[in-house]
Amino acid sequence: MKDSESRSTKNRRPRDPAPATFAAKAELPASTLLLFDIDGTLVLTGGAGGRAMSMAFAEVFGVRDAFRGITMAGRTDTWIVGDAASAHGIPPDSPDLAHFREVYLQHLVSELQQPGNGRKGTMPGVRELLDTLAARDDVYLALLTGNYESGARLKLEYYDLWHYFACGAFGDDAPQRNGLVSRAVTRVAASGGPVFANRDAVVIGDTPLDVECASYCGARSLAVATGSHSVDQLREAGADAVLQDLGDTQEVLRVIADFGSRMAG
Ligand SMILES: [Mg+2]
């Protein structure tokens, strides 16, 4: 978005040209809301989340391997746990489900310390990208993740990434991911950040469900193939842009700038 086309000027007086001095006087507002997914996008935990869920379910409900056959990637924790509860005959209003969350978080703390299975670590380029974006005033960083907020915090604090994000939308907020972009926009404004529209948001995630939640509400999607889906699968899902990973900061900035210019045009 160009200075002369800033949202506040357009909304207040759409037919008046901006004063010539507007750009010099106004503080440049963040024009793009970047909503980052966590698992498979920023980090991989070596399966800590899945193991912690499984252990908690066994502890609280006495069911082992409760999540066998239940897809986790891209889905909210509320959705995943609801599916497991349904599969094992646990009523959706069972008070034990709230207890499950507490036990899950306890196990997550210890499982994050384990070497785990498969890939574990910060994804390529993530820290450099977040450092670069945090220094800019034309983007605003927040989270859009299926994790419970407390689980998101534990995962990102383990990798020292939590401090980059002021707020976000989490798996506690809505059972389906499609509701989370609007929730994130509302949360950013409520926490003192800029007032965005859904179309100002870019969802950065690793699954077709991240892509879908962006298109569902008029946001853009930047998909990365560092999780459980390939570049081709993410393209087929309709992502607005797809990258192998976030390793090339300048390339990510170009994609975001391209989205911005198309939004303003
Ligand atoms: Mg993910």
Image (tube, rainbow, N blue to C red):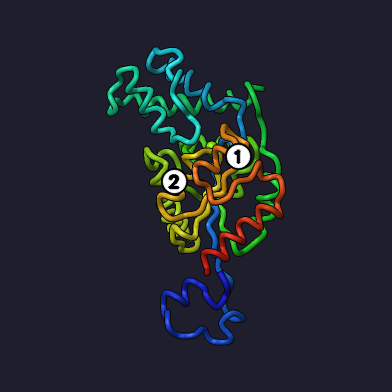
Q: Is residue 257 above or below residue 171?
A: below
Q: Which residue is mark 1?
A: 231
Q: Residue at x 37, y 38 (%)?
A: 175
Q: Which residue is mark 2?
A: 213
Confirm whether residue 35 shows in the render: no
Q: CA distance from mark 2 to mark 1?
A: 18 Å
Q: Secondary structure at mark 2?
A: helix
Q: Is residue 202 above or below residue 124?
A: below
Residue 198, image x and y in percent? 44, 57
Picture quadrant where residue 244 is located = top right
Q: Nearer the viewer, mark 2 or mark 1?
A: 1
Q: Which mark is residue 39?
A: none
Dot placed on the residue nearer the N-terminal end, 2 or 1: 2
* Drawn side of residue 122 relative to residue 98, left or right: right
Which quarter holds ligand 1? top right
Q: Residues within 10 Å of mark 1 (few under 14, many from 20)?
A: some
* Drawn side of residue 154 relative to residue 120, left or right: left
